[in-house]
Amino acid sequence: MPSIDAAVIVLAVIALLAAFVNGALGYGFSSLTVPVALVFYTNRVLNPAVVLVEVFVNLYVLCINLSGVPAVWRRVLPILIGMLPGIAIGAFALTSLQPGWTKFATYSIILPLILLQAAGWRKPIQSKWLVGLPFGTTLGILYSVTTISGPPLAILFNNQGLVKDEFRAGLALVRVAESSLTAIAYYRLGLFIEESRSILFVIVPCVLVGIPLGAYLIRRLDAETFRRICMSFDGWVVGFGLSRVLIELNLMTSPWAYSVMAGTILIDAYLLYVFFTVRRGTVTWSQALASLRSGHRGGGRS
């Protein structure tokens, strides 16, 4: 078992990286921080610190995307209503579940969602209330148990056809509501313990540095490629965490448990190959069209 100092160093590094990603993309802090931090901490200790940080991070993201709120608030309203009972159920479950099984549930639910998102799964969703209410309840349970909601939200909003500004505004609205309500539920259940406060003191400085840095540097990076690479890192980390918890719960023995991580890496490597192959073809096609138009304009002037 690593020392406390090693755990704190790893937590600080991953929190800084996650804050950088969140500043660049508008989401991803808990999706990156939690899978790594769960190697050293339980959900019951980690979640309250992460949720408090996310309340302020999500408020910041919402403030810089307020222009997109009028276009999306009706779409997210069913999710927000459905979320209320889900958060209450999930927060109570967190106090009752054995920590090892909570980790197992976290990794098992998140991993397929990350791979679906990485695969670019698309299925147009039209019925907002019929889908939004049960989705909101499920999301509330998921977030209050794991503090992770980015992958399922990204899948839903992409399949609803939200454009960039609407996507970020909708994501921020839902995440402000879920983090604030979960923080209230945790407080009522007495989950803000001393260990959680010590984690909070490590995470906050990393967030204050990482988010502005990510927001600044994303202007110089290709956002879609950066997002896809972050998703791969997230998937590999979750695969490793799931392998570790399978050993911890005596569900599989080492080294066979690490076949889960190996399988995740192989699947994601294939999806990465498909992503960059399609992207290269799109760029080449766009360049060909641009050259053709340039040639026509040149011919017209001669």
Image (cartoon, helix red, strand yellow):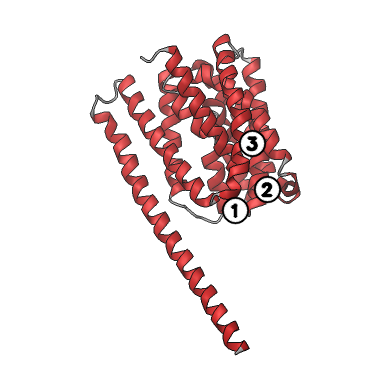
Residue on which the image places disc 2? 75
User: 81 and 111: which one is in front?
Assistant: 111
Q: Give whichever of discs 1 and 3 has the lower sequence position.
A: 1
Image position, residue 3 (x, y; %) = 40, 12
Q: Give whichever of discs 1 and 2 has the lower sequence position.
A: 2
Label 3: which secondary element: helix
Residue on which the image places disc 3? 212
Image quarter where the N terminus lies is: top left
Label 1: which secondary element: loop
| Residue at the image position 61 percent from the left and 30 percent from the top | 209
Image position, residue 157 (x, y; %) = 59, 49
Q: Amino acid at mark 1?
A: Gln
Q: Mark 1 against mark 3, which lies toward the viewer?
A: 3
| Residue at the image position 53 percent from the left and 33 percent from the top | 18
Residue on which the image places disc 1? 160
Q: Amino acid at mark 2?
A: Arg
| Callouts 1 and 2 close, C-beta under 8 Å | yes
